[in-house]
Image (cartoon, rainbow, N blue to C red):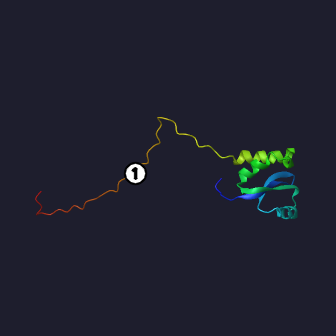
Amino acid sequence: MATDKTFNVFGVSKLNGEYKVRFANDVMRIKVLAKHGHEDITLVDLEKSVTKYEGIKAIASMPEFANASAQAAITEYLEEKAPKASKPAAKGVMKPAKAVKAPAKTAKVTEDEDAPF
């Protein structure tokens, strides 16, 4: 994840029949979600602010989110946003070097009759 934002309210809600995870910094987010047509809204306030991924991992084992729909939304988010491990470079294989061109130097040649050569 490319963000350092932290949240302390995490949960799930259903919109148009699809459950999704939700993040906020205030439990009053419930009002906004309900106003926009969300149903089955379940939010919990964690003790401290954490990143989105850490917060969703924390609520995954809570009894409030034990139903299949909430678990499916949480699992989908965790799989999609899981930190990617970088692949180690294979031994003996070198990356191709970037070609660098030296600037061409041109010398101005004049033909002088008085030149020693």
**How far across and how far down the image is residue 25, in percent?**
76, 62
- Neighbours of disc 1 within 10 Å: few (<14), some (14-19), many (20+): few
Q: Is residue 15 visible?
A: no
**How far across and how far down the image is residue 16, in percent?**
86, 55
Q: Is residue 116 left or right of residue 57?
A: left
**How far across and how far down the image is residue 69, in percent?**
85, 46
Indicate the quadrant where residue 97 lies: top left
Farthest front residue in view: 47
Q: Is residue 75 visible?
A: yes
**How far across and how far down the image is residue 92, in percent?**
46, 35
Please determine whether, in this image, residue 105 is positioned above or below residue 57. below
Quadrant for the C terminus in the image: bottom left
Say which residue appears at 77% left-offset and 45% top-offset: 75
Please give the residue where the numbered disc 1 appears in the rendered image. Answer: 100
Tell me which amino acid carries mark 1. Val
Q: Is residue 19 left or right of residue 83?
A: right
Farthest right residue in view: 40
Q: Nearer the viewer, residue 36 or 107?
A: 36
